[in-house]
Image: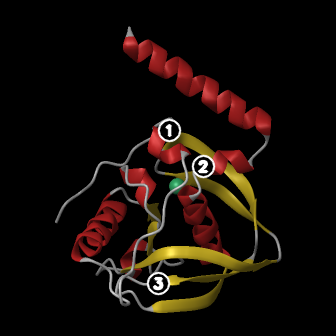
Amino acid sequence: MTILKILQYPEASLLQPSGPVEITDGKIDDKIRTLIKDMGETMFQAPGVGLAAPQIGINKRIIVYDAMAEGSEEENPDKKFKALVNPEIIKKSGSIVSENEACLSVPDFKSNVKRFESVTVKGENAEGEKLEFNVEGIFAIIMQHEIDHLDGILFFERVSSLKRRMYKKRIAKKLKESEK
Ligand code: NI
């Protein structure tokens, strides 16, 4: 079991698009599978309900999420998580407000974010099997948030520019002070 370091804004890996994971003959290589396991453990330890590979400094299109994200912590004692490799949103509809959305890579910032209510996602699981499914509510929000990470987009890019500017300023100031 390896707990990985979760990087924070303005780390470069968070701000650039990630490349696809190569799948040969429907198989995902062992290195990636180990990485997925470590990402799951890291996510639960944080704790969070989703984690994308760029958040641990790896610019590959991999996300993991809490399989029981809609319930309480007690409802997922085995810490079951799901992984998606090369996920893609192929359909989206409706509109909801994700209340007080947060991100492990954007500390001390929460905001309501407008999201699609329902999304259809296509990708592969950790075994390299092709999947296509529709999710709503919290899982739709997780998909949009985590897949954004794979495109180098942090959730504050989806809130009012004033809020975002204030946050970036606050972080810049903090970094400057820590250099002193
Ligand atoms: Ni995030």
Can you give x and y, in whole percent of width and height, for residue 27 in the image? 33, 86
Q: Earlier in the sequence, mark 1 or mark 2?
A: 1
The circle drawn on residue 154 is 2
Which mark lies nearer to you, 3 or 1?
3
Asked whether disc 1 touches disc 2, contact meaning CB atoms under 8 Å apart, the reply is: yes
* Residue 49 visible, this orientation: no
Per the image, label 1 sits on a secondary structure element best described as loop
* Residue 132 visible, this orientation: yes
**Residue at image mark 3:** 124
- 166 above or below 116? above
The circle drawn on residue 9 is 1
Classify 10 Å Cα crowding around label 3: few (below 14), some (14-19), many (20 and above): many
Q: Quadrant of residue 79?
A: bottom left
Q: Quadrant of residue 39?
A: bottom left
Q: Tell me which amino acid carries mark 1.
A: Tyr
Q: Residue at x 58, y 42 (%)?
A: 109
Residue nearest the observer in this picture, 25 or 3: 25
